[in-house]
Amino acid sequence: MAARTAPARGLTDDAVEFIRFCYGRRRVGWPELYDEMCAVASRGLFRGWGPDELAEHGIRFGLFEMPGLAARVCEIVAEDRARARAAGHLASRGAAVA
């Protein structure tokens, strides 16, 4: 029987901020971003939180949690990139009109 993993949808707002914090430090995709998240967690660079505190917010670094975490991280990064593109597009249009 294959192990099934629930998607990492149960992330708190703080967990999403952690992902954005890590992505802001190193703008890379998965799996490099996973490495950055592990480094940040191991050093407590986000609010002093380590893996245990992050687990309380839905961020777990285990092998079985990785597919769901990867999917959720990719969604968050894609949303942020789309927002940044839209903001840049609107800013450039505003500059052209002014």
Image (tube, rainbow, N blue to C red):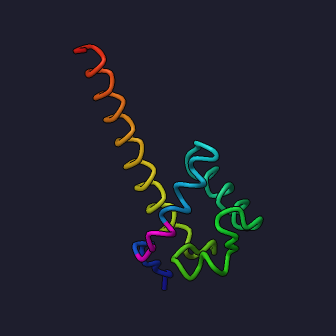
Q: Magenta includes 89?
A: no
Above or below — where is 78 with respect to 90? below
Q: Nearer the viewer, residue 27 or 74?
A: 27
Counting from the top left corner in percent of width and height, residue 37 is at 64, 60
Q: Please tell me which residue is depicted at 49% across the width and 81% down the height of the picture.
A: 2
Q: Residue furthest bottom?
A: 1
Q: Is residue 31 left or right of residue 81?
A: right
Counting from the top left corner in percent of width and height, residue 5 is at 47, 78
Q: Nearer the viewer, residue 5 or 56?
A: 56
Q: Which residues are magenta?
A: 10-15
Q: Residue furthest front?
A: 98
Q: Please tell me which residue is depicted at 63% across the width and 71% down the height of the picture.
A: 61
Q: Please tell me which residue is depicted at 43% across the width and 78% down the height of the picture.
A: 6
Counting from the top left corner in percent of width and height, residue 23 is at 57, 50
- Where residue 60 sits, quadrant-wise, is bottom right
Query: In which quadrant will I find the C terminus?
Result: top left
Q: Nearer the viewer, residue 79 or 48?
A: 48
- Where residue 21 sits, quadrant-wise, is bottom right
